[in-house]
Image (cartoon, rainbow, N blue to C red):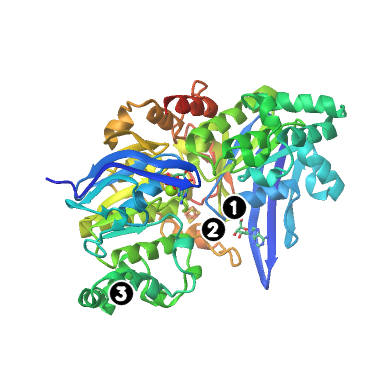
Amino acid sequence: MLLEIKELTVEFTSMQDKIKALKNVSISINQGEIVGIVGESGSGKSVTALTILGLLEKNASIPAGSITYKGRNILTLDKKELQALRGKEIGMVFQEPMTALHPTMRIGDQLAEVIHRHRRISYREAYQQAVISLAEVQINDPELVARKYPFELSGGMRQRVVIALAMSAPPDLLIADEPTTALDVTIQHEILKLMQDLAAKRGTSIMLITHDLGVVAEVCQRVVVMYAGEVVETGTTEEVLHRPNHPYTKALIGALPDLAVPGQALSAIPGESPDLRNRPRGCVFASRCADSLPICVEESPVLEQAYNGVHTHQVACWRREAE
Amino acid sequence: MNPLLQVAGIGKEYRKGSQSFHAVSGVDFSIARGETFGLIGESGSGKSTIGKMITGLEHPTSGSLLYDGTPLWTDNKFNRLKPGEMQIVFQDPQSSLDPRMRVQSIIMEPLQALPAAERKAKGTTEKLHALITRVGLKVEHLNRFPHEFSGGQRQRIAIARALITDPAFVVLDEPTSALDVSVQAHVLNLLQELKRERNLTYLFISHNMSVIRYMCDRMAVMQKGRIVETGTVADIFNNPKDAYTQTLLSSLPSLHAKKVDNECSTEQSLEKSASKSS
Ligand SMILES: Nc1ncnc2c1ncn2[C@@H]1O[C@H](COP(=O)(O)OP(=O)(O)O)[C@@H](O)[C@H]1O
Ligand SMILES: Nc1ncnc2c1ncn2[C@@H]1O[C@H](COP(=O)(O)OP(=O)(O)O)[C@@H](O)[C@H]1O
Ligand code: SF4
Ligand SMILES: [Mg+2]
Ligand SMILES: [Mg+2]
């Protein structure tokens, strides 16, 4: 196991309020695996990523849980150790590539500087490596692009550069938070393919955060479905997307126009996400669930194996299929 | 039967100093009454510009637009045939709703363009209350400000605002692109219901192919200001003729996707082939 998040709870204090953004989140990632974290906005995907990276804002606290990376609990590392981990061991790619790029520095220099820092080679060698790494993210004419500034590139090209930066150490884990959300669909397709190829070639694990179940289906081996700061269902992509067991996962798939028959209404989920300042006592989905039982509003279900006779994955629901 | 909207060879050229840029070139299509016509393409392909030319927000620099047989533009002047007959809903309800106005004033505002008698007839409290509840909000919401609402609720406000004049034709420019999937489902269902109840005709603009497939009868695929393919949704999805349409469809991440294939052309090769062909 490369990364293991165990029963993680994260809270934010804002004014008088305590916002419980993550509750009892457990996620594991094996070496070389691409794991999708999927959920609607506010479900806690980015907070999960930022917690791993030690980049939570000052108003955050972590009252419970652990994050073990290669046997070390990340949550106990100091600032310096975390900084060493980021970039070198754990690479990151965010939705907006400009946040990762220096606006007034040429692409080649930005890459060379990072490579120079990580690999103890001369700057000249690092620059040559930088050009090679641009070629590796399938940028045509890497020498030319190396001499350009970020604003001279398209969004898709910038995201390729950011991936080259993130992969330059090279890291064992890449955390990508909505890396293709701002891009057109044809470019998204290429970037996903690129990430998949790089991961396969170098054995890098990827935590791919997305709101798009289609993206998960396309590239992830396993998927974690989050709702209101909790993991409600997890398993292989095939299992979860083709045989969803949790009412929320089922409803989310039913709400997609992708498989819907034109003319027939989409199955929309009634109500709204719960207030994270005041979480329900029982199941977090109970107020919107068509299948809820009396116990659902009393006690929250924990993530447990569901089993339909042939297949198995984990579901947090009192109605999960079991033997 | 005559089409409700006929778009013939329209173009939009933007000039800046000595430079000129064709955002839209030689676009033809027509929309029949009661139809939902989809316009799909990647960002910058000219979709919104077309929506704006139809609704009077930008004038075409070439070609003609006929609504119910009458030209919409004479030179650079938009002919308001019947005020309120056409409306537009934009993607981002955050920026399209004036934050300083209460919901009631926002919804009623388009009535200003109507003659006094009609304004009075369409703007009764009874009608307003019926409309706000019809789009899934409450009467007490009328007194609030846009920031007090979620993204989905704000889009419901924008829809109510578009419908207050009883339009026949509505341009929907990426109406659900900023929304979560479960919220999008509610809004798409609402748009379908309203269309049936009010005999509306829609121009539905989106970069999301699944949404277009689900919502539209016919569609056009745009690339760099031009239409590369027009047809029924079923034809285009089942049997795309144009190479760009094929690329677009093969890029669509599908719930039942196989893993990413390796044969798809790259962004750069696409750019190259596009610059060659233009
Ligand atoms: N610094 C913060 N202060 C208060 N609340 C926060 C902070 N950061 C995130 N949150 C809240 O935590 C929840 C989860 O956010 P996030 O992880 O960003 O969701 P997403 O799944 O969309 O990435 C949201 O309700 C958000 O408002
Ligand atoms: N006012 C303007 N001046 C100059 N160029 C513009 C203007 N409005 C839009 N454009 C350009 O026209 C092209 C088409 O834009 P748009 O119609 O908004 O595309 P879409 O809606 O398909 O994303 C883009 O390249 C855009 O930058
Ligand atoms: S635990 Fe109960 S309320 Fe929650 S998802 Fe399952 S059935 Fe629905
Ligand atoms: Mg996020
Ligand atoms: Mg647009």
Vertical relation: A122 (above or below) B55: above
* Relative horizontal placement of residue B177, taking residue B68 as reference (left or right): right
Chain for numbered disc 2: A
Residue A284: give its label: 2
**Disc nearer the start of the sequence (1/2):** 1
Residue A214: where, in percent of width, then height? 48, 38
Q: Residue A174, percent across and down?
A: 68, 36
**Percent coordinates x, y for residue B29 in the rendering:** 26, 41
Ligand 3 within 8 Å of disc 1? The answer is no
Q: Residue A154, position in %: x, y?
A: 58, 38
* Ligand 3 lies under 8 Å from the Cβ of mark 2: yes
> Mark 2, mark 3: which one is toward the viewer?
3
Q: Which mark is residue B34?
A: none
Q: Which residue is mark 3?
A: B129
Tag 1's secondary structure? strand
Please name whichever residue, A186 or B19, is drawn nearer the observer in this view of the structure.
B19
Q: CA distance from mark 1 to mark 3?
A: 38 Å
Q: Residues within 10 Å of mark 3 (few under 14, many from 20)?
A: some
- Front residue of A187/A271: it is A187
Q: Are marks 1 and 3 in contact (CB under 8 Å)?
A: no
Secondary element under disc 3, as helix, strand or loop, is: helix
Q: Residue furthest left?
A: B1
- The residue indicated by pointer 1 is A230
Q: Relative to residue A26, is residue B208 drawn left or right?
A: left
Depth check: A82 or B102 in front? B102
Depth check, front residue: A87 or A52 = A87
Identify which amino acid the numbered label 1 is placed on: Glu
Q: CA distance from mark 1 to mark 2?
A: 8 Å
Q: Is residue A301 left or right of residue A73?
A: left
